[in-house]
Amino acid sequence: MKQYSNLLPRLLLPALIVAIGLSTYARALDLSPEQPGRLRGEKSEKVVAAIPTTFKFVEDGTFTVGIAVDNPPLATYATDAKTVVGYDPDLALLVSDTLGKKLELVPVAWADWPLGLQSGKFDAVISNVGVTEQRKEKFDFSTYRQGLHGFYVKSDSSITSIKEPKDIAGLRIITSSGTIQEKILLEWDKQNLAKGLKPAQLQYYDDEAVSALAIQSGRADAEFNPNATQAYRAASEGTIKLVGTVNAGWPLVADVAITTRKGSGIAESLTAAINELIDNGKYAQLLQRWQLTPEALERSRTNPPGLPKI
Protein backbone atom coordinates (compact mmCIF):
# COMPACT_ATOMS: atom_id res chain seq x y z
CA MET A 1 0.00 0.00 0.00
CA LYS A 2 1.37 3.40 -0.97
CA GLN A 3 2.25 5.80 1.84
CA TYR A 4 1.56 9.51 1.30
CA SER A 5 2.29 12.51 3.48
CA ASN A 6 -0.13 15.38 3.99
CA LEU A 7 -0.49 18.09 1.38
CA LEU A 8 1.37 20.91 3.16
CA PRO A 9 4.89 19.38 3.07
CA ARG A 10 4.28 18.31 -0.52
CA LEU A 11 3.73 21.92 -1.47
CA LEU A 12 6.33 23.59 0.72
CA LEU A 13 9.37 21.32 0.38
CA PRO A 14 9.70 21.55 -3.43
CA ALA A 15 9.50 25.33 -3.12
CA LEU A 16 12.32 25.33 -0.57
CA ILE A 17 14.43 23.13 -2.84
CA VAL A 18 13.91 25.54 -5.72
CA ALA A 19 14.75 28.49 -3.48
CA ILE A 20 17.97 27.20 -1.92
CA GLY A 21 18.81 23.95 -3.68
CA LEU A 22 20.56 25.25 -6.78
CA SER A 23 23.15 27.22 -4.83
CA THR A 24 23.73 24.23 -2.55
CA TYR A 25 24.20 21.93 -5.55
CA ALA A 26 26.64 24.35 -7.14
CA ARG A 27 28.80 24.36 -4.02
CA ALA A 28 28.83 20.56 -3.68
CA LEU A 29 29.27 19.63 -7.34
CA ASP A 30 30.34 21.94 -10.12
CA LEU A 31 27.34 22.73 -12.31
CA SER A 32 28.87 25.83 -13.87
CA PRO A 33 28.97 26.00 -17.67
CA GLU A 34 32.71 26.77 -17.51
CA GLN A 35 33.58 23.46 -15.79
CA PRO A 36 37.12 24.48 -14.70
CA GLY A 37 37.69 21.07 -13.11
CA ARG A 38 36.72 19.04 -16.17
CA LEU A 39 39.28 16.35 -16.97
CA ARG A 40 40.93 16.04 -20.35
CA GLY A 41 42.67 13.09 -21.92
CA GLU A 42 45.36 12.57 -24.52
CA LYS A 43 45.17 10.99 -27.94
CA SER A 44 46.22 7.34 -27.92
CA GLU A 45 47.89 6.24 -31.13
CA LYS A 46 47.31 2.62 -30.10
CA VAL A 47 43.57 3.13 -29.72
CA VAL A 48 43.32 5.21 -32.90
CA ALA A 49 45.15 2.53 -34.87
CA ALA A 50 42.60 -0.03 -33.67
CA ILE A 51 39.59 1.87 -35.07
CA PRO A 52 38.38 -0.20 -38.03
CA THR A 53 38.62 1.54 -41.40
CA THR A 54 35.11 0.33 -42.14
CA PHE A 55 33.64 2.47 -39.35
CA LYS A 56 32.44 5.84 -40.60
CA PHE A 57 31.95 8.56 -38.01
CA VAL A 58 28.88 10.76 -38.39
CA GLU A 59 31.27 13.67 -38.96
CA ASP A 60 34.95 13.41 -39.81
CA GLY A 61 37.18 14.34 -36.90
CA THR A 62 34.27 14.27 -34.43
CA PHE A 63 32.89 11.72 -31.95
CA THR A 64 29.13 12.30 -31.94
CA VAL A 65 27.40 11.04 -28.83
CA GLY A 66 23.71 10.80 -27.97
CA ILE A 67 22.92 11.64 -24.35
CA ALA A 68 19.78 12.02 -22.25
CA VAL A 69 20.09 15.16 -20.13
CA ASP A 70 17.74 14.45 -17.24
CA ASN A 71 19.56 12.61 -14.49
CA PRO A 72 22.15 14.42 -12.34
CA PRO A 73 24.95 13.70 -11.64
CA LEU A 74 25.07 11.53 -14.79
CA ALA A 75 23.92 14.29 -17.13
CA THR A 76 22.11 17.55 -16.50
CA TYR A 77 22.10 21.13 -17.70
CA ALA A 78 24.49 23.60 -16.12
CA THR A 79 23.38 26.77 -14.37
CA ASP A 80 23.13 28.48 -17.78
CA ALA A 81 20.35 25.98 -18.66
CA LYS A 82 22.05 24.98 -21.94
CA THR A 83 25.51 23.46 -21.29
CA VAL A 84 25.44 19.70 -20.67
CA VAL A 85 27.47 18.68 -17.61
CA GLY A 86 27.91 15.57 -15.50
CA TYR A 87 29.66 12.23 -15.39
CA ASP A 88 28.48 10.90 -18.76
CA PRO A 89 29.44 14.00 -20.79
CA ASP A 90 32.80 14.08 -19.01
CA LEU A 91 33.40 10.43 -19.91
CA ALA A 92 32.40 11.17 -23.50
CA LEU A 93 34.98 13.97 -23.58
CA LEU A 94 37.77 11.77 -22.20
CA VAL A 95 36.94 9.03 -24.71
CA SER A 96 36.86 11.50 -27.60
CA ASP A 97 40.23 12.89 -26.47
CA THR A 98 41.63 9.36 -26.44
CA LEU A 99 40.26 8.80 -29.94
CA GLY A 100 41.83 12.05 -31.10
CA LYS A 101 38.41 13.50 -31.95
CA LYS A 102 36.36 16.55 -31.08
CA LEU A 103 33.21 15.84 -29.08
CA GLU A 104 29.69 16.63 -30.24
CA LEU A 105 26.92 15.90 -27.73
CA VAL A 106 23.41 15.39 -29.08
CA PRO A 107 20.72 15.66 -26.38
CA VAL A 108 18.03 13.01 -26.85
CA ALA A 109 15.08 11.71 -24.84
CA TRP A 110 16.17 8.48 -23.19
CA ALA A 111 13.38 6.51 -24.85
CA ASP A 112 14.52 7.74 -28.29
CA TRP A 113 18.19 6.73 -28.17
CA PRO A 114 17.72 3.31 -29.88
CA LEU A 115 16.14 4.82 -32.99
CA GLY A 116 18.64 7.67 -33.07
CA LEU A 117 21.58 5.28 -32.86
CA GLN A 118 20.24 2.84 -35.44
CA SER A 119 19.44 5.65 -37.88
CA GLY A 120 23.02 6.96 -37.68
CA LYS A 121 22.24 10.20 -35.87
CA PHE A 122 25.21 9.61 -33.57
CA ASP A 123 28.24 7.31 -33.34
CA ALA A 124 27.47 6.11 -29.82
CA VAL A 125 25.18 6.59 -26.85
CA ILE A 126 26.62 7.36 -23.41
CA SER A 127 23.56 7.65 -21.23
CA ASN A 128 23.32 5.11 -18.40
CA VAL A 129 22.34 2.24 -20.70
CA GLY A 130 22.53 -1.14 -18.97
CA VAL A 131 23.71 -4.27 -20.76
CA THR A 132 20.91 -6.78 -21.38
CA GLU A 133 20.75 -9.84 -23.58
CA GLN A 134 17.79 -8.36 -25.44
CA ARG A 135 19.65 -5.13 -26.22
CA LYS A 136 22.70 -7.10 -27.35
CA GLU A 137 20.65 -8.40 -30.27
CA LYS A 138 20.71 -4.90 -31.77
CA PHE A 139 23.64 -3.11 -30.12
CA ASP A 140 27.25 -3.56 -29.02
CA PHE A 141 28.47 -2.49 -25.59
CA SER A 142 31.66 -1.21 -23.95
CA THR A 143 31.16 -1.19 -20.18
CA TYR A 144 32.15 1.84 -18.10
CA ARG A 145 30.31 1.70 -14.78
CA GLN A 146 28.62 -0.72 -12.44
CA GLY A 147 24.86 -0.41 -12.29
CA LEU A 148 24.27 -0.02 -8.56
CA HIS A 149 21.35 0.62 -6.27
CA GLY A 150 22.19 2.25 -2.96
CA PHE A 151 20.81 2.19 0.55
CA TYR A 152 20.83 5.73 1.97
CA VAL A 153 19.86 6.79 5.49
CA LYS A 154 19.67 10.06 7.40
CA SER A 155 23.19 11.43 7.95
CA ASP A 156 22.96 10.97 11.72
CA SER A 157 21.23 7.57 11.56
CA SER A 158 22.53 4.77 13.77
CA ILE A 159 22.28 2.42 10.76
CA THR A 160 25.78 1.86 9.42
CA SER A 161 25.45 -1.05 7.00
CA ILE A 162 22.76 -2.57 4.76
CA LYS A 163 24.30 -5.10 2.41
CA GLU A 164 22.38 -8.37 2.68
CA PRO A 165 18.81 -9.59 3.30
CA LYS A 166 19.00 -9.80 7.10
CA ASP A 167 19.99 -6.13 7.27
CA ILE A 168 16.54 -4.95 6.11
CA ALA A 169 14.56 -6.96 8.67
CA GLY A 170 12.13 -4.67 10.49
CA LEU A 171 13.16 -1.53 8.58
CA ARG A 172 10.88 0.97 6.83
CA ILE A 173 12.38 1.36 3.36
CA ILE A 174 11.44 3.75 0.58
CA THR A 175 11.70 2.41 -2.96
CA SER A 176 10.03 2.81 -6.35
CA SER A 177 7.07 0.65 -7.30
CA GLY A 178 7.41 -1.78 -10.20
CA THR A 179 11.20 -1.49 -10.37
CA ILE A 180 14.18 -3.83 -10.16
CA GLN A 181 15.04 -2.42 -6.75
CA GLU A 182 11.57 -3.23 -5.44
CA LYS A 183 11.92 -6.80 -6.70
CA ILE A 184 15.22 -7.14 -4.84
CA LEU A 185 13.66 -5.92 -1.60
CA LEU A 186 10.66 -8.21 -1.96
CA GLU A 187 12.93 -11.22 -2.50
CA TRP A 188 15.12 -10.27 0.46
CA ASP A 189 12.01 -9.85 2.62
CA LYS A 190 10.74 -13.26 1.49
CA GLN A 191 14.03 -14.85 2.54
CA ASN A 192 13.89 -13.10 5.90
CA LEU A 193 10.33 -14.20 6.62
CA ALA A 194 11.30 -17.79 5.85
CA LYS A 195 13.97 -17.48 8.55
CA GLY A 196 11.57 -15.98 11.08
CA LEU A 197 12.94 -12.43 10.86
CA LYS A 198 10.81 -9.31 11.07
CA PRO A 199 9.23 -8.13 7.81
CA ALA A 200 10.44 -4.97 6.13
CA GLN A 201 7.89 -2.25 5.48
CA LEU A 202 8.17 -0.84 1.95
CA GLN A 203 7.07 2.72 1.37
CA TYR A 204 6.25 4.26 -2.00
CA TYR A 205 6.17 7.98 -2.75
CA ASP A 206 5.39 9.76 -5.99
CA ASP A 207 7.87 12.60 -5.49
CA GLU A 208 11.50 12.89 -4.44
CA ALA A 209 10.86 15.83 -2.12
CA VAL A 210 8.33 13.83 -0.10
CA SER A 211 10.73 10.87 0.09
CA ALA A 212 13.43 13.17 1.45
CA LEU A 213 11.03 14.54 4.04
CA ALA A 214 10.08 10.99 5.15
CA ILE A 215 13.75 10.16 5.79
CA GLN A 216 14.49 13.41 7.62
CA SER A 217 11.35 13.25 9.76
CA GLY A 218 11.97 9.67 10.83
CA ARG A 219 8.94 8.18 9.09
CA ALA A 220 11.28 5.99 7.04
CA ASP A 221 14.60 4.39 7.97
CA ALA A 222 16.24 4.12 4.55
CA GLU A 223 15.79 4.61 0.82
CA PHE A 224 16.80 2.01 -1.76
CA ASN A 225 16.96 3.38 -5.29
CA PRO A 226 19.59 3.98 -8.04
CA ASN A 227 22.87 4.94 -6.37
CA ALA A 228 23.97 7.73 -8.72
CA THR A 229 20.94 9.95 -8.10
CA GLN A 230 21.11 9.47 -4.35
CA ALA A 231 24.87 10.06 -4.31
CA TYR A 232 24.17 13.39 -5.97
CA ARG A 233 21.66 14.28 -3.27
CA ALA A 234 24.08 13.19 -0.54
CA ALA A 235 26.87 15.35 -1.95
CA SER A 236 24.56 18.29 -2.62
CA GLU A 237 22.52 18.41 0.54
CA GLY A 238 24.59 16.59 3.17
CA THR A 239 21.46 15.17 4.81
CA ILE A 240 21.81 11.50 3.83
CA LYS A 241 24.65 8.97 3.74
CA LEU A 242 25.40 5.74 1.90
CA VAL A 243 25.34 2.54 3.99
CA GLY A 244 25.39 -0.13 1.30
CA THR A 245 25.11 -0.93 -2.39
CA VAL A 246 23.63 -3.82 -4.34
CA ASN A 247 24.21 -4.51 -8.02
CA ALA A 248 21.10 -3.68 -10.02
CA GLY A 249 21.22 -7.16 -11.55
CA TRP A 250 21.24 -8.98 -8.22
CA PRO A 251 21.85 -11.87 -7.91
CA LEU A 252 23.46 -11.36 -11.34
CA VAL A 253 25.64 -8.45 -12.47
CA ALA A 254 24.39 -5.46 -14.47
CA ASP A 255 26.91 -3.04 -15.97
CA VAL A 256 26.37 0.28 -17.73
CA ALA A 257 27.99 0.68 -21.13
CA ILE A 258 28.72 2.88 -24.12
CA THR A 259 26.25 1.67 -26.74
CA THR A 260 26.99 1.39 -30.45
CA ARG A 261 25.34 -0.12 -33.52
CA LYS A 262 25.56 -3.91 -33.70
CA GLY A 263 28.47 -5.05 -35.82
CA SER A 264 29.72 -1.51 -36.52
CA GLY A 265 33.17 -2.52 -35.29
CA ILE A 266 33.83 0.44 -33.02
CA ALA A 267 33.00 -1.23 -29.69
CA GLU A 268 36.42 -2.86 -29.21
CA SER A 269 38.14 0.49 -29.76
CA LEU A 270 35.88 2.19 -27.22
CA THR A 271 36.58 -0.59 -24.72
CA ALA A 272 40.31 -0.06 -25.29
CA ALA A 273 39.87 3.69 -24.76
CA ILE A 274 38.10 3.16 -21.43
CA ASN A 275 40.76 0.71 -20.27
CA GLU A 276 43.44 3.25 -21.15
CA LEU A 277 41.60 5.79 -18.98
CA ILE A 278 41.50 3.21 -16.18
CA ASP A 279 45.24 2.61 -16.53
CA ASN A 280 46.23 6.29 -16.55
CA GLY A 281 44.04 7.17 -13.55
CA LYS A 282 41.62 9.51 -15.35
CA TYR A 283 38.74 7.08 -14.87
CA ALA A 284 39.11 7.01 -11.09
CA GLN A 285 39.46 10.81 -10.98
CA LEU A 286 36.27 11.19 -12.99
CA LEU A 287 34.28 8.91 -10.71
CA GLN A 288 35.54 10.81 -7.69
CA ARG A 289 34.65 14.16 -9.26
CA TRP A 290 30.99 13.15 -9.50
CA GLN A 291 30.82 11.18 -6.21
CA LEU A 292 30.47 7.82 -8.01
CA THR A 293 33.57 5.95 -6.83
CA PRO A 294 31.55 2.92 -5.56
CA GLU A 295 30.46 2.28 -9.16
CA ALA A 296 33.99 1.75 -10.52
CA LEU A 297 34.80 -1.20 -12.79
CA GLU A 298 38.16 -2.95 -12.68
CA ARG A 299 38.18 -3.29 -16.48
CA SER A 300 35.94 -2.39 -19.38
CA ARG A 301 34.57 -5.32 -21.37
CA THR A 302 33.00 -5.62 -24.79
CA ASN A 303 29.58 -7.29 -24.85
CA PRO A 304 29.78 -9.06 -21.47
CA PRO A 305 26.88 -11.24 -20.30
CA GLY A 306 23.86 -9.01 -19.80
CA LEU A 307 20.70 -9.31 -17.79
CA PRO A 308 18.59 -12.15 -19.22
CA LYS A 309 15.43 -11.66 -21.21
CA ILE A 310 12.34 -11.49 -19.06
Image (cartoon, helix red, strand yellow):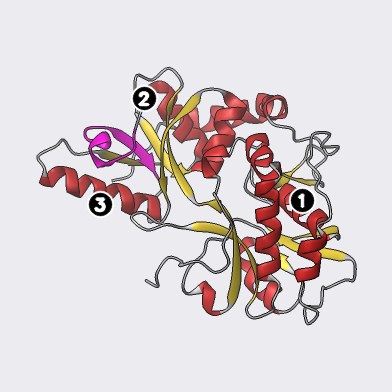
Tell me how far mark 1 sits from mark 3, CA to CA.
39 Å
Tell me how far mark 3 sits from mark 2, CA to CA.
22 Å
Mark 2 Cα shell of 10 Å, populated few (<14), some (14-19), many (≥20): few
Total tally of numbered discs in the picture: 3
Mark 1 Cα shell of 10 Å, populated few (<14), some (14-19), many (≥20): many
Rendering coords of residue 228 (x, y %): 55, 42
Q: Secondary structure at mark 2?
A: loop
Q: Secondary structure at mark 1?
A: helix
For the point 52% across and 37% down, which residue is it? 230
Q: Is residue 145 magenta?
A: no
Q: Which mark is residue 94?
A: 1
Magenta segment boundaries in residue numbering: 162-175
Tell me how far mark 2 sits from mark 1, CA to CA.
35 Å
Q: Which residue is mark 2?
A: 160
- Asked whether 228 or 46 is in front, the reply is 46
127 vs 199: above or below: below
86 vs 49: above or below: above
Q: Which residue is mark 3?
A: 187
For the point 55% across and 35% down, which residue is it? 231
Q: Is residue 24 visible?
A: yes
